Amino acid sequence: KLIWDVLLETVMEDDKISEDERNLLDSIMVNLKEYAQAVEYALVDGIITEEEKEELLDLRKKLISDAESTAFKDEVITEEEVNIIAKLAKVMTELDLRVADA
């Protein structure tokens, strides 16, 4: 599944998307685009170097950190936002494992 689909399933567990959840998803998607571009660039030569792996790891950490900051903008992180961030972290960790094996 695509990351978007996994996150949307998590958001729709309660059959609604709140404004906070929408803002969180928007923030995540902006950072996912940056991450996807970095992966694409790293794969141009068919080899992901150690330097590129580190860059991807840093981008993953930034993605999750930015998601947490976005969720806490209103000084409250809802259970739904926690679930979205946890699912994001899980999916990104799985991606990192694939990148590490590349």
Image (cartoon, rainbow, N blue to C red):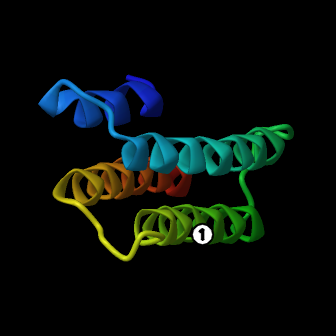
Q: Taking 24 as reference, is 35 left or right?
A: right
Q: Residue at (44%, 34%) from the top-left corner?
A: 3
Whether residue 102 is visible, yes or no, is: no
Q: Within 10 Å of the Cα at label 1, are there few (<14), some (14-19), or many (20+) other Cα atoms?
A: some
Instruction: Tell me residue 53's x, y (percent).
Output: 65, 63
Q: Amino acid at mark 1?
A: Lys
Q: Residue at (57%, 42%) from the top-left corner?
A: 26
Q: Which image quadrant is residue 54 in?
A: bottom right
Quadrant holding the N terminus: top left
Relative to 84, say whether 46 is above or below: above
Q: Taking 58 as reference, is 77 left or right?
A: left
Q: Taking 91 as reference, is 101 left or right?
A: right
Q: Residue at (33%, 31%) from the top-left corner?
A: 6
Residue tagged by mark 1?
A: 62
Relative depth, front residue between 17 and 51: 17
Whether residue 22 is visible, yes or no, is: yes
Instruction: Tell me residue 77's x, y (percent).
Output: 29, 67
Relative depth, front residue between 54 and 17: 17
Q: Residue at (35%, 36%) from the top-left corner?
A: 7
